[in-house]
Image (tube, rainbow, N blue to C red):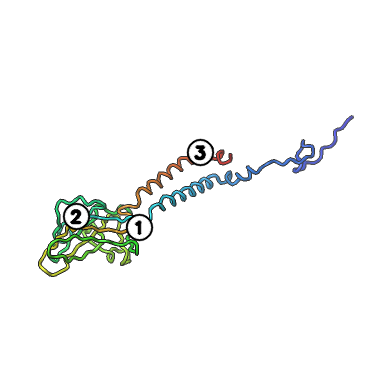
Amino acid sequence: MFKSPKEPPFNPLYPPNTGGILKLEDNSGIQNSAFFHRFPKLVVLALAAIILAVFCVAVFSTSPASAQQQVWYFSNIDSGEDDFNGNTVYVMYKGDNNNETANYVIIPDEDFRIWIADQAVQADEIVFDPSEQCYWDVGIGLSGQDNNVDWFVGGWDPDTNSFYDETSDGDGDNNKLTLQQGHYLSMALLDSDTNSWDVNVRVTWTRYPPYVGTYLAWTCDDPPYPVPDVGAWIMFASGGIVIGFIIWRFARKDRLRRFLLN
């Protein structure tokens, strides 16, 4: 009776039915994708973070801090606010010098008047930190015999109807001006002499000097007032939404894994 030879013991290096020949499979693709299979969400999040980081750098590096100054032009428009003496607080408009309805705002002898920005701070806070490149620039148009005024840049608190400057804004730094959300950038003009004349502050802008109005300028576009750079933030948010949607669609139908592996 014919007997088949006894099969050799199983050897993992020589699988059965291979004729004793070692077969090596190309597992490089599997090995390279092993990390993705084990941590798919981590890989996806890392890729998204890298893309967003590159996007942020590209967007926020396109506008240098001192590229363009911010200017507020004085007007005789009533802001609806009153100071602690019951005097009208006027509006200064950012980037617009065509809002006046009269030529002058009169400051009585040894008195003061306050102007506030046309928009309140809409971020948590805005900090103006003077430097060699960034500082306050003021132009005051005066008419009449009294040309002596002192100016003070600060903030306006609508809750207490009060003006404050960098020494009383509560940030502990007497050089920086910190404005809280809901407050207004502000400027006060004071008739600083002891004569009996009023001060006429010109708020009308005409084509020919010396008929110029009054303005307050910050020589940099950073920090942007009254909100952070809206355009950049919109682009950033839109990019994040688009990337998130793409990841969600791919991950939902298992397309992202096949795309990355192929």
Cα–Cα gap, marks 1 and 3: 42 Å
Which amino acid is tagged 2? Tyr
Q: Which secondary structure lies at badge 3?
A: helix
Report which quarter residue 149 is drawn in. Answer: bottom left
Lower position in the chain sequence, tag 1 or tag 3: 1
In the rendered structure, are the residues bearing label 1 and label 3 in contact, judged by CB atoms less than 8 Å apart?
no
Q: Is residue 144 left or right of residue 243?
A: left
Residue 248 in view, yes or no: yes
Residue 107 appears at what percent x and percent y? 14, 61
Q: At which x and y percent is residue 98?
A: 20, 50
Determine the residue located farthest toward the bottom in the rendered image.
194
The residue at 28%/62% (across/down) is 136
Q: Quadrant of the N terminus?
A: top right
Crowding at dot 3, Cα within 10 Å, few <14 / some 14-19 / many 20+, comes out as some
In this rendering, which labeled residue sits more in front, label 2 or label 3? 2
Question: In the structure shown, which secondary structural element does the residue marked by tag 2 occupy?
Answer: loop
- 112 horizontally vs 23: left or right: left
Q: Name the residue tied to disc 3.
A: 250
Kind of residue at disc 3: Phe
Query: Which amino acid type corresponds to the residue marked 1 in the rendered image?
Result: Ser
**Circle 2 residue:** 208
Q: Give how far apart the Cα atoms at labels 1 and 2 are.
A: 28 Å
Relative side of 194 to 14, left or right:
left
